[in-house]
Image (cartoon, helix red, strand yellow):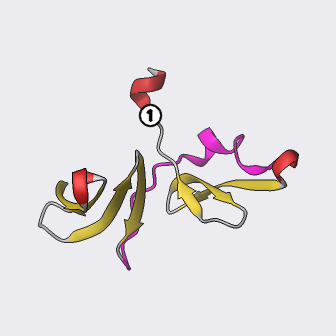
């Protein structure tokens, strides 16, 4: 897959990259800001299944942080492990092999 990156604003504070398949069709885009990457899938595209249910099923479920009255649901969405933070959005997770190798 190839990647096109566009910068937005001063000092490259924000950028958007587009992910292309081998024939050049756009599969999605990633919005980069302050060290965070927000992945957006193009309508109609389903990424390959990365989360093997047997491997992640022990992580799935609801978690609670009482001092902030915060609930987080760990789930599989679009074939990836994801967290749904109450009052926010669903964040897809990626396993960082380099950090845990």
Magenta-highlighted stretch: main secondary structure?
A: loop
Mark 1 surroundings within 10 Å by alpha-carbon count, few (fewer than 14), some (14 through 19), many (20 or more): few
Left or right placement of residue 92 versus residue 6 in this view: right
- The residue shown at (50%, 57%) is 79
Extreme-right residue of the structure: 66
Instruction: Report x, y in % for residue 25.
Output: 18, 71
Instruction: Report x, y in % for residue 17.
Output: 25, 59
Quadrant of the snapshot with the C terminus: top left
Above or below, 26 relative to 55: below
Left or right placement of residue 59 versus residue 47 in this view: right
Left or right placement of residue 92 versus residue 41 in this view: right
Above or below, 56 relative to 68: above
Instruction: Report x, y in % for residue 93.
Output: 51, 48
Extreme-front residue of the structure: 10
Q: Name the residue under label 1.
A: 96
Residue 65 visible in rendering: no
- The residue shown at (47%, 44%) is 94
Instruction: Report x, y in % for residue 67.
Output: 86, 46
Which image quarter: residue 26? Answer: bottom left
Quadrant of the snapshot with the N terminus: bottom left
- The residue shown at (35%, 74%) is 42
51 is within the stretch colored magenta: yes
User: In what element is the residue under mark 1?
Assistant: loop
Segment colored magenta: 43-64
Which image quarter: residue 86? Answer: bottom right
Which image quarter: residue 30? Answer: bottom left
89 is within the stretch colored magenta: no
Number of marks drawn? 1
Q: Which of 88 and 34 is in front in this view?
A: 34
């Amino acid at each position: 897959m190839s990647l096109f990156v566009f910068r937005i604003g001063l000092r490259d504070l924000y950028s958007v990259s587009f992910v292309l398949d081998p024939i050049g069709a756009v599969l999605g885009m990633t919005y980069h800001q302050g060290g965070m990457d927000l992945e957006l899938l193009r309508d109609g595209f389903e990424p390959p299944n990365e989360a093997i249910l047997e491997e992640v099923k022990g992580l799935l479920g609801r978690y609670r942080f009482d001092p902030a009255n915060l609930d987080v649901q760990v789930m599989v969405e679009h074939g990836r492990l994801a967290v749904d933070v109450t009052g926010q959005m669903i964040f897809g997770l990626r396993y960082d092999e380099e950090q845990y190798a």
